[in-house]
Image (spheres, rainbow, N blue to C red):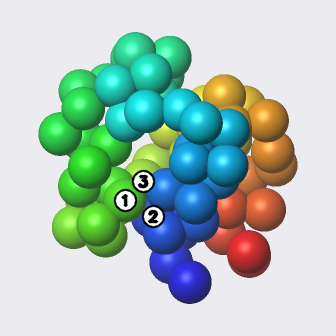
Amino acid sequence: MSIGENIRNKRKDLNMSQNDLASAVGVSVPMICQIERGTKSVTLMLGAEIAKILQCDLNDLVNL
């Protein structure tokens, strides 16, 4: 699985919408959508912030 798919799965496991995640990390909903689809890359800093909000480690998102 890609990091985008892992983010989507973890977000859904937490019953969190794309809007919720976008607001929590300070990016737009289209940005989250693009990350989850794999059309936009995640910076290390944004990935770490997303992992924090999703209550996991960045390695979990990369290696799931």
Give amino acid for label 1.
Glu
Q: Nearer the viewer, mark 1 or mark 3?
A: 1
- What residue does disc 1 label? 36
Frontmost residue, 23 versus 59: 23
Q: Nearer the viewer, mark 2 or mark 3?
A: 2
Label located before the other in sequence (1 or 3): 1
- Badge count: 3
Can residue 22 be seen here? The reply is no
State the separation of the CA atoms marked 1 and 3.
Answer: 10 Å
| Labelled pair 2, 1 in contact (Cβ < 8 Å) | yes
Q: Which residue sits at x=42%, y=53%?
A: 42
Q: Position of residue 27 (x, y in %)?
A: 32, 25
Q: Position of residue 35 (x, y in %)?
A: 33, 56
| Labelled pair 2, 3 in contact (Cβ < 8 Å) | yes
Q: Within 10 Å of the Cα at label 2, are there few (<14), some (14-19), or many (20+) other Cα atoms?
A: many
Secondary structure of the residue carrying tag 1 is: helix
- What residue does disc 3 label? 42
Can residue 11 be seen here? The reply is yes
Q: Quadrant of residue 54?
A: top right
Q: Position of residue 61 (x, y in %)?
A: 67, 61
Give amino acid for label 3.
Val
Label located before the other in sequence (2 or 1): 2
Give the numbered dot on residue 24. Answer: none
Q: Quadrant of residue 34?
A: bottom left
- What residue does disc 2 label? 4
Give amino acid for label 2.
Gly
For the N terminus, which image quadrant?
A: bottom right
Q: Which residue sits at x=57%, y=45%?
A: 11
Q: Is residue 35 left or right of residue 5?
A: left
State the separation of the CA atoms marked 2 and 3.
Answer: 9 Å
